[in-house]
Image: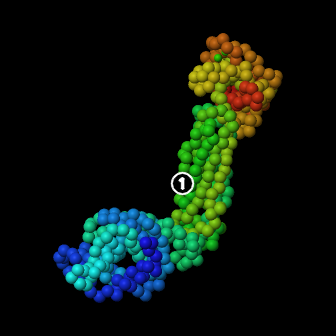
């Protein structure tokens, strides 16, 4: 049988109407709180018109499982004549103890006694508990005092949430439309296999009212396409005291590592919900917002600026700066993938400083429009390994070099069709012009 407030009222009324109650129980001292015959009755405020928690449990001998928990718009019922053998220990939303109550044990019931009158019997099965409502209550521990056993801990927050969503104007509830009003991602749009790139995701969290301030739980979930890993997968932010008209921006950094070449994406979804169950957000559609960040995963390559020179001095003038993109096997110079400089698409080559080259691809083109295939000196500046490398030339004054610049990079595409990106850098020493 599903118990509802009406049937509870009937049960309570019929129990109260019984006068002679005999109990088949072992002898116990008067007032023994574990004895159904003499345990004191719960004290109720009969003038209290306020709401109650209604918790329906399926009782076993030493445990109970939750059937349903709800908030009902009437006061807790009396159960005069039922043995108050349960202790209910309440905990609030902050995890603090919020008082204890005695309660009747619904497993006890009245039957006609063979010797006349009635007696109480114990039976397992469904039963209901009611106790006064408090919007800040989070859970209740149900303890069987007679058996000395904790029967169940019931999470009451879903019941509070359900009630306040249905009754947002109730004085015990708070109505606040929390929303993610905007989100954006920034970071380097070019990565290389195996090297981390940081993507920063910002989101604006607002309380659109009518009530406030309220505490909000904000979470971010990050996922990537098949060719990247993203960490962490989740972030959480505690936004306390979110007032109407005063949005808050949260910001999370995500480390993205390319595992496959080509166009990849990272999507981060920011969500908000009220921290407290009594806060009703009636507009769910604005509680999440996603942003997708595109990242091009390039093959890392080894560059030798000025083959033959270890120091790589660069004068910032219109002269040609030579540099070689080395043809390498997988594992050579720590590169995870093999690279054949003969497959470089010459028109796509850009040479420049790292930030601009990574962010926008801004840099100088190959000044002859072609890749010069020759067996360059390796990074030791002494040996040649017999394969053909891609020697490029770019005008030094078009590279964006500043006095404190310490490296020059190359990016471009290689291979058939639209090709795949490659990227590599080498150190330089800027020297005064005309020296
Ligand atoms: Ca909302
Ligand atoms: Ca060099
Ligand atoms: Ca080589
Ligand atoms: Ca070579």
Instruction: Reply above or below: 402 against 38.
Output: above
Total marks shown come to 1
Instruction: Reply above or below: 190 against 307.
Output: below
As helix, strand or loop, the secondary structure at mark 1 comes to: strand
Q: Quadrant of residue 126?
A: bottom left
Q: Residue at x 58, y 50 (%)?
A: 221
Residue 343 image point, x, y percent: 73, 22
Quarter of the image for the C terminus: give it. Answer: top right
Instruction: Reply above or below: 74 against 240.
Output: below
Q: Quadrant of residue 118?
A: bottom left
Residue 187 visible: no
Q: Residue at x 65, y 61 (%)?
A: 286
Residue 431 image point, x, y percent: 70, 26
Q: Quadrant of ligand 4?
A: top right
Quarter of the image for the N terminus: give it. Answer: bottom left
Q: Nearer the viewer, residue 198 or 41?
A: 41
Q: Quadrant of residue 407?
A: top right
Classify 10 Å Cα crowding around label 1: few (below 14), some (14-19), many (20 and above).
some
Residue 83 image point, x, y percent: 30, 77
Instruction: Reply above or below: 244 against 266.
Output: below
Q: Residue at x 45, y 72 (%)?
A: 2
32 horizontally vs 18: left or right: left
Which residue is tagged 1?
A: 236
Q: Nearer the viewer, residue 62 or 96?
A: 62
Residue 225 image point, x, y percent: 63, 41
Return the residue found at the far front: 114
């Amino acid at each position: 049988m599903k118990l509802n407030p009406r049937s509870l009222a009937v049960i309570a009324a019929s129990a109260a109407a019984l006068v002679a109650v005999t109990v088949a129980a072992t002898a116990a001292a008067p007032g023994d709180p574990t004895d159904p015959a003499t345990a004191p009755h719960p004290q109720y405020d009969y003038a209290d018109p306020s709401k109650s928690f209604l918790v329906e449990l399926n009782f076993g001998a030493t445990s109970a499982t939750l059937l349903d928990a709800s908030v009902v718009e009437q006061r807790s019922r009396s159960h005069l004549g039922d043995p108050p053998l349960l202790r209910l220990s309440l905990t609030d939303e902050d995890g603090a103890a919020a008082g204890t109550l005695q309660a009747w044990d619904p497993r006890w019931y009245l039957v006609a006694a063979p010797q006349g009158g009635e007696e109480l019997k114990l039976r397992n099965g469904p039963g209901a508990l009611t106790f006064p409502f408090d919007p800040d209550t989070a859970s209740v521990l149900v303890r069987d005092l007679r058996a000395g056993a904790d029967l169940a801990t019931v999470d009451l927050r879903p019941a509070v949430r359900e009630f306040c969503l249905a009754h947002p104007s109730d004085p015990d509830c708070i109505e606040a439309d929390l929303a993610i009003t905007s989100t954006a991602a920034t970071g380097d749009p070019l990565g290389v296999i195996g090297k981390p790139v940081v993507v920063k995701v910002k989101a604006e969290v607002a309380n659109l009212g009518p009530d406030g301030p309220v505490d909000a739980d904000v979470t971010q979930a990050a996922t990537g396409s098949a060719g990247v890993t993203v960490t962490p997968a989740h972030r959480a932010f505690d936004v306390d005291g979110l007032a109407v008209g005063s949005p808050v921006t949260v910001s999370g950094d995500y480390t993205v590592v390319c595992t496959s070449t080509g166009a990849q994406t990272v999507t981060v979804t920011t969500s908000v919900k009220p921290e407290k169950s009594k806060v009703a957000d009636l507009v769910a559609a604005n509680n999440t917002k996603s942003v997708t960040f595109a990242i091009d995963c390039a093959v890392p390559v080894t560059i030798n600026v000025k083959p033959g020179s270890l120091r790589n001095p660069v004068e910032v003038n219109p002269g040609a700066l030579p540099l070689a993109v080395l043809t390498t096997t997988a594992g050579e110079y720590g590169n995870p993938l093999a690279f054949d400089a003969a497959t470089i698409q010459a028109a796509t080559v850009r040479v420049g400083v790292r930030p601009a080259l990574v962010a926008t691809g801004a840099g100088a083109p190959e000044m002859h429009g072609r890749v010069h295939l020759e067996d360059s000196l390796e990074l030791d500046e002494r040996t040649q390994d017999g394969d053909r490398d891609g020697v490029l030339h770019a005008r030094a004054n078009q590279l964006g070099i500043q006095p404190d610049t310490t490296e020059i990079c190359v990016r471009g595409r290689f291979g058939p069709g639209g090709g795949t990106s490659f990227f590599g850098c080498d150190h330089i020493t800027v020297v005064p012009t005309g020296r």
